[in-house]
């Protein structure tokens, strides 16, 4: 008779991978990599374009919000030739005892560059049209309103790949358009948001 605490040892079979299974798996992985890796290069420039556009959009939303919160004018300057932008704070409204006249001048943040390979395709509004060279200034009044704006980013290596931002000046609603066929964002002239 066996004691109740005794263990029953059965035979177990250990199973691993066969060499054939490993070779088939490695071959399938090699085929997948052979198809995917060459196409990754096409995604990186588009990701840079979207990344620059998203960062610029966040800056625009921030400047619009700050204009409302501080009840002061704010602006964003776009350097269309050098692919960079900066936020411009307005001058102080009045001097206090511990300030001097230099405090009445505008002050700016440092320039923020677009990612490598991304350039401005243009910026403008429906009234003045799209500027493609020089400096462009997007201004927000003390209520956070601006004119209706459009900003276009492009890849320097392929000008048909575009990212566009159309913004309504009174509501702040934005529409993002992406195109790999060279289709430009369109901003229709509306009287209330084109001042």
Image (tube, rainbow, N blue to C red):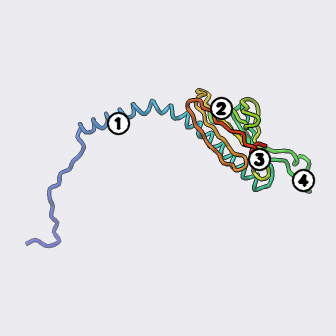
Q: Nearer the viewer, mark 1 or mark 2?
A: 2
Q: Nearer the viewer, mark 3 or mark 4?
A: 3
Instruction: Determine which residue is flagged by label 2.
Output: 119
Determine contact: label 1, label 4, CB under 8 Å.
no
- Earlier in the chain: of badge 3 and badge 4, it is 4
**Local crowd at mark 1 within 10 Å, few (<14), some, or many (≥20)?**
few
> Horizontally, is 59 left or right of 21 in the view?
right
Cα distance in 3D space between marks 4 and 2: 38 Å
- Earlier in the chain: of badge 1 and badge 4, it is 1
Q: Residue at x 14, y 59 (%)?
A: 10
> Horizontally, is 143 left or right of 161 in the view?
right
> Horizontally, is 171 left or right of 40 in the view?
right
Q: Secondary structure at mark 1?
A: helix
Q: Quadrant of residue 23?
A: top left
Cα distance in 3D space between marks 3 and 4: 20 Å
Cα distance in 3D space between marks 1 and 3: 53 Å
Instruction: Determine which residue is flagged by label 3.
Output: 140
Cα distance in 3D space between marks 3 and 2: 24 Å
- Earlier in the chain: of badge 1 and badge 3, it is 1
Viewer-side residue, 2 vs 138: 138
Q: Secondary structure at mark 2?
A: strand
Cα distance in 3D space between marks 1 and 4: 68 Å
Image location (x, y in percent) of residue 101: 91, 48
Instruction: Examine the rendering and report whether any part of residue 109 can be seen.
Output: no
Instruction: Determine which residue is flagged by label 1.
Output: 29
Instruction: Determine which residue is flagged by label 4.
Output: 94
**Residue 154 in the image: above or below residue 76:** above
Cα distance in 3D space between marks 1 and 2: 37 Å
Instruction: Examine the rendering and report whether any part of residue 73 can be seen.
Output: yes
- Earlier in the chain: of badge 3 and badge 2, it is 2
């Amino acid at each position: 008779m066996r004691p109740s605490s005794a263990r029953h040892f059965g035979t177990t079979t250990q199973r691993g991978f066969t060499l054939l299974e490993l070779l088939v798996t490695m071959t399938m992985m090699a085929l997948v990599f052979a198809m995917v890796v060459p196409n990754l290069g096409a995604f990186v420039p588009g990701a840079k374009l979207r990344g620059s556009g998203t960062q610029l959009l966040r800056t625009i939303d921030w400047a619009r919000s700050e204009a409302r919160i501080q009840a002061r004018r704010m602006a964003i300057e776009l350097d269309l030739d050098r692919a960079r932008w900066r936020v411009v704070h307005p001058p102080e409204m009045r001097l206090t005892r511990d300030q001097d006249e230099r405090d009445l001048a505008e002050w700016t943040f440092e320039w923020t560059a677009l990612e490598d390979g991304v350039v401005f395709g243009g910026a403008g509004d429906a009234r003045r049209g799209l500027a493609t060279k020089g400096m462009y200034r997007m201004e927000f009044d003390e209520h956070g309103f601006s004119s209706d704006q459009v900003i276009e980013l492009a890849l320097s290596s392929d000008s048909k790949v575009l990212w566009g931002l159309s913004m309504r000046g009174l509501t702040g609603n934005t529409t993002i358009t992406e195109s790999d066929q060279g289709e430009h964002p369109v901003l229709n002239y509306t009287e209330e948001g084109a001042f």
